[in-house]
Amino acid sequence: MRIDNVKLSPLAKEDELLSVAIKKSKIKPSKVKSFRVLKKSLDARDKNDIKFVYSVEISENEINDIDIKIPTVDKPKKVAVVGFGPCGIFCALYLARAGVKPIVFERGKSVEERQKSVNRLINDKNLDENSNIQFGEGGAGTFSDGKLNTGVSSPLIKTVLKELVRYGAPKDIEYLAKPHVGSDNLPKVVSAMRKEIIRLGGEVRFDSKVKDLIIKGDKVVGVKVNGNDIEVDDVVIAVGHSARDTFYMLNQNGFAMERKAFAMGVRIEHLKRDVDVCQYGEKFADILPSADYRLSSRKGTRGVFTFCMCPGGFVMPSTSEEEMVVTNGMSCYKRDGQNSNSAVLCEVYPEDFKDGILGGVELQRDLERLAYRSGGGDYFAPVQTYKDFLQGGVKTPFTRVKPTYSVGFTPFDLNNLLPKFMSENLKIGIEDMAKKLKCFNDGSAVLTGVETRSSSPVRVLRGEDGQSVNYKGAYPSGEGCGYAGGITSAAVDGIKTAFKIIEKYTGRKIEF
């Protein structure tokens, strides 16, 4: 029996939930054999009467989940998976379970070594262009809080969450309305998934950048990696949104691609407690988990919205190319840092791009190079209070909200960095969004430039069979190829791609 709208005060103990659910179900307590939380959200509309709202399942029998039945291939096939972010990880895992032999080629390092690469950028201003916050085991999401909420709808979302818990993620991600793993937990999860892929017969090769594809006629038959030609039956292109050299390689090989809209902007930081009070009121601000928000505005000529909100988090150096500055946000599972931050982004349309399929990439690069120069070099980021951004100039010291960008920062007028359409729409959007979240346009809030990598500026076209529309044996997948927008949707697309390949070799449809 499913019971919705079960409410508890934040001051109540969670073990009270069972007794409330039993009363609603009218099942005798002695007869209850199974109980689980299906969903947990927070209703904070009335700041004096905030409630946790649950959907639960209670039964007199054991509750068993039905796993997806995956057929196995009769003869092992060799499939290259290019990229080991969420799309590549989940694709390789499901291929391995079906008896396919995935060979993962990841340009970056293992998650353990990758952390060292990130630290070298922060501490020594030494960038490894193949192992950084964008590239390496786990993908960009490993260093961005591990948020799992998504705008896509798929029955495979529950599958993704269940798998992450199986490999070490917190159990609550299966039922929280806005689940997150935390950048401190994700490394052990992706490491455990890698070990499982290897146990099932797959390979994971780090420091292995795919420079080119081997193409015969209209079929991709292999990859060129570290000077070697490796023949395979299929290639899954599971790169992230920052794999710019891969986009150029695909374009040069004649893959059908299209330009797509994306968004760019800055990171905005507030004191975490200000956001907590704004969302919960003084009564509950110090009791409830760190508050988040999701805001948008269409008041200006372009849509403006928040993205990748990190409660109690930090602004991170996220470039993957020399002499460029890119920002992102991250937070650990406890979300207990002094500041909360979010990207605040402005829509960018294809007509804003330079010429060519990859004009969006070049637009990103131009802004990132300018941000590097505006920060003064050494990967310092340009920063400004919101008050000064509105008025122009750099006058207000960072006394209340202090920038958390870890490499270093330089006060700079972001009006002289951002394109005019972007700066003007950000101002209009922030002011409009403050009508929903009063503290959002606080003059002491800190803006850090620039956030350019929210999504891929291109899409690699594919057909119903998951393969490139003009090359058989190539499966464009995930965020970089334009089919996802975050950890969960990328993982879902990775599973779907694996299913397409398995179905091709077994002739059996996978139901989910």
Image: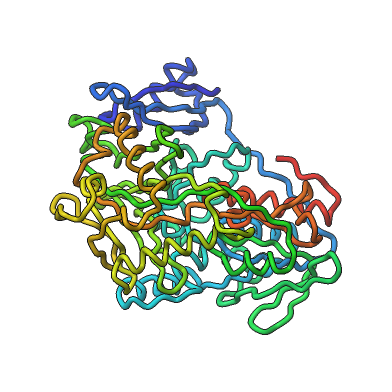
Q: Is residue 397 left or right of residue 218?
A: left
Q: Position of residue 406 (x, y in %)?
A: 29, 65
> Above or below — where is 228 with respect to 487?
below
The colour mode here is rainbow
Q: Residue furthest bottom?
A: 227
Q: Is residue 368 left or right of residue 230?
A: left
Q: Which quadrant of the figure has residue 48?
A: top left
Q: Is residue 417 visible?
A: yes
**Residue closest to the eye, 177 or 298:** 298
Q: Which residue is found at the position 24% from the left and 57% from the top?
A: 403
**Quadrant, the C terminus:** top right
| Depth order, front residue of 77/394 | 394
Q: Residue at x 38, y 46 (%)?
A: 344
Q: Is residue 370 left or right of residue 511?
A: left
Where 168 falls versus 112 (above or below)? Answer: above
Q: Which residue is located at x 50 percent, y 59 percent?
A: 363
Quarter location, residue 240: bottom right
Whole-percent x, y for residue 148 in the image: 48, 46
In what quadrant of the picture does the N terminus appear?
A: top right
Return the residue nearer the eye: 140 or 78: 140
Q: Quadrant of residue 293?
A: top left
The percent position of residue 45, horizontal first and vertical second, equals 32, 23
Question: Image height check: is 223 above or below 481?
Answer: below
